Image (cartoon, rainbow, N blue to C red):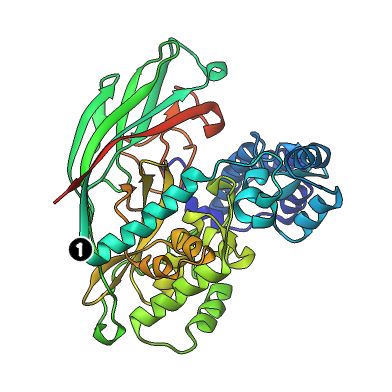
Amino acid sequence: MYYDLKYMSVPLPEDIVKLKNYGDFDGAGKLIEHLLSNELPQALRKRLEIEQDIIRIVGINEYPFDFVEANKMMKETFKDYQEQELTELKETGKVDWLYIDGKIHFQRRFLMNLIKTQADYEARLIVKEDNEVDRLRKQELTQNVQIMKEQGGRKVKIHLKTSIQVKKEYERPGEIVKVYLPIPKDCKQVSDIQILKTTPEATFIAPEKEAQRTVYFETVLKEDQVFSVEYSYTNQVDYVVLDPEKASELQPEFELSEELPHIRFTPYLEKLLEEILSGETNPIKKARKIYDFITTKVNYSFMREYFTIDNISEYAAVNLKGDCGVQAILFITLCRMANIPAKWQSGLYVSQYYTGCHDWAQFYVSPYGWVFADLSFGGGARRNGDLDRWNYYFGNLDIFRMPANSEIQTDFNPPKQFLRADPIDNQRGEFEYENQGLPYAYLEVKQELVSMEELV
């Protein structure tokens, strides 16, 4: 990796923290440069080097709206809006904000997040959103549960196309570029992976067992050039009912360690886990208690870039909010702390109604082996009153997945030269020139389901 992210666990000097909290990112950057010009402990030096890029990324359109702009957006979006509402939302933690030069600014997706997570605001929309697609997607997930229970499993062949392109204003034709797109990897539920087409011709296709598998392009960039890959694979998921009475007393000892900075066994998480488990010793019951805590207490929320968060698992547990990946990392961390092996899986959710990025988790209990947990889908089902689907996502997964990653914060093959747009995960792809990597704000990514065929 461009950075060894475990150094994010090193505390920042207090004067940098003060400047960051006030939103004086220029001042924080100048102080970091001054400190780096002096002799420092190596660990602190590495932490400050990482912080330089965190400050830069936060400044690239992550919190673009000041109070005046945000209030105007709210007034144009919701019926009977009163200006004090935004202050109340900020004070109750329902919108993401920070200071920039001492003034409050709101996260770029604060409005979308409010509509998605607060039913009362969705009901007040001036222009009603078409919820038909969302309704059909939820119906499809509920039907999947029924079919899985009736048949004991499902098997499908999925054909996908994904692409990445640099936005016109950041395009530099004639320069050498290195481009990565995620592709399906060999894992528990995936087989018969076929790379059908790449445009242009791929320079390298990583082996199927790669932890974060990609197709790699290295070429001279042409004007308006799109990099794409088409692939197919078989996805087979078996239905499992986890019976605590059948859980073995002897459990394996792999996938139990910390992975700093985000899978970290902190004092707060130790106290929280003790409270969650309440003395429970059965591994299936312990995992279920952790699942129940996250799906009932941690609210779904869109997130800023993961790279800008010091410790994702503790962030979720302290702020009681997070998206699919944040919730999955908290689940993995708490399971490992409870001596339940757990690991990451991510890629795409793919169906006829929606295709997009998604993260989930796996955990291991004997005699069942590796099983799944989808925290955000489970929590969403419970909030919608679908308790059957909530229970299903403890131990099970649907068939609408493209797994590309089995670990977080790991190198590509071949490794990327510069800082990745997402150093934690890879669902959208990466793009770099000979002198810099590009953030997602500079890129356009598309993901398209071509076909899905049910197999006997």
Above or below residue 438? Residue 344 is: below
- Which structural element holds mark 1? helix
- Is residue 397 in sight in this rendering? no
- Is residue 82 in sight in this rendering? yes
Across the whole image, how many numbered discs are drawn on residues?
1
- Give residue 301's quadrant in the image: bottom right
* Residue 133 percent location from the top left of the image: 47, 43
Please give left or right for residue 332 compared with residue 106 in the image.
left
- Residue type highlighted by circle 1: Gln
Q: Which residue corresponds to the image point at 34% horizontal and 57% vertical from the top-left?
A: 143
- Give residue 245's quadrant in the image: bottom left
94 vs 387, nearest the viewer: 387
* Residue 445 percent location from the top left of the image: 45, 30
Q: Residue furthest bottom?
A: 279
Residue that carries the numbered disc 1 in the rendered image: 151
Packing grade of label 1 (10 A; few <14, some 14-19, many >=20) is few
Please give left or right for residue 4 compared with residue 184 in the image.
right
Q: Which residue corresponds to the image point at 35% horizontal and 74% vertical from the top-left?
A: 340
* Residue 162 percent location from the top left of the image: 36, 31
Please give left or right for residue 261 compared with residue 184 in the image.
right
390 vs 367, nearest the viewer: 390
* Residue 208 percent location from the top left of the image: 21, 43
12 vs 80, nearest the viewer: 80
Above or below residue 250? Residue 332 is: above
Q: Quadrant of the N terminus?
A: top left
Please give left or right for residue 55 compared with residue 360 in the image.
right
